[in-house]
């Protein structure tokens, strides 16, 4: 496959904390190969921290994100609902 033969990825969406790739479905000759590669990329994307790229896991509160441990802690600190001030 030469460089020009690569099909255009026309949509990449973030879905459930991972990436999902959509390709032109008309190219069936290489579809299996492509979907295999996409599968691989999707698996990787759900294990990669969105912030720093370190190995992470899906988690978060109320929304699904893929974060590593340090970034998750950081996020939780940032999004923490302030406790009512004591008088
Ligand atoms: Zn991280």
Image (cartoon, rainbow, N blue to C red):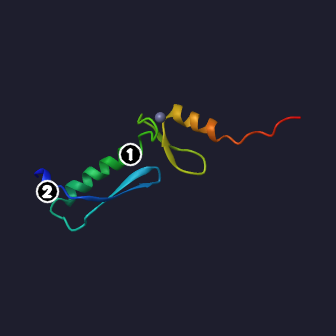
Report which residue position mark 1 lands on: 45
Mark 2 touches mark 1? (CB < 8 Å)? no
Residue at far top of view: 70
**Up-down: is 61 above or below 78?**
below
Reading the chain from its start, which is encountered first: label 2 or label 1?
2
Count of labels in the image: 2
The secondary element bearing badge 2 is classed as helix
Q: Quadrant of the C terminus?
A: top right
The residue nearer to you, when weighing 59 against 85, is: 85
Residue 47 drawn at (x, y percent): 41, 41
- At horizontal 45% and vertical 41% (from top left) the residue drawn is 50
**Up-down: is 1 above or below 53?**
below
The secondary element bearing badge 1 is classed as helix
Q: Give the number of the disc on residue 31.
A: none
Cα separation between marks 2 and 1: 25 Å
Report which residue position mark 2 lands on: 5
Image quarter of residue 77: top right
Q: How many residues crowd mark 2 within 10 Å: few (<14), some (14–19), many (20+)?
A: few
Q: How many residues crowd mark 1 within 10 Å: few (<14), some (14–19), many (20+)?
A: many
Of marks 2 and 1, the one in the foreground: 2
Q: Is residue 4 left or right of residue 62?
A: left
- At horizontal 39% and vertical 51% (from top left) the residue drawn is 19
């Amino acid at each position: 496959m030469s460089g020009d033969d690569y099909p255009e990825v026309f949509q990449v969406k973030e879905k459930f904390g991972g990436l999902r790739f959509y390709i032109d479905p008309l190219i069936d000759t290489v579809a299996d190969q492509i979907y295999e590669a996409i599968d691989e990329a999707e698996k990787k994307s759900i294990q990669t921290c969105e912030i720093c790229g370190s190995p992470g896991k899906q988690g978060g509160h109320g929304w699904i994100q893929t974060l590593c441990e340090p970034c998750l802690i950081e996020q939780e600190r940032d999004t923490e609902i302030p406790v009512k001030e004591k008088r």
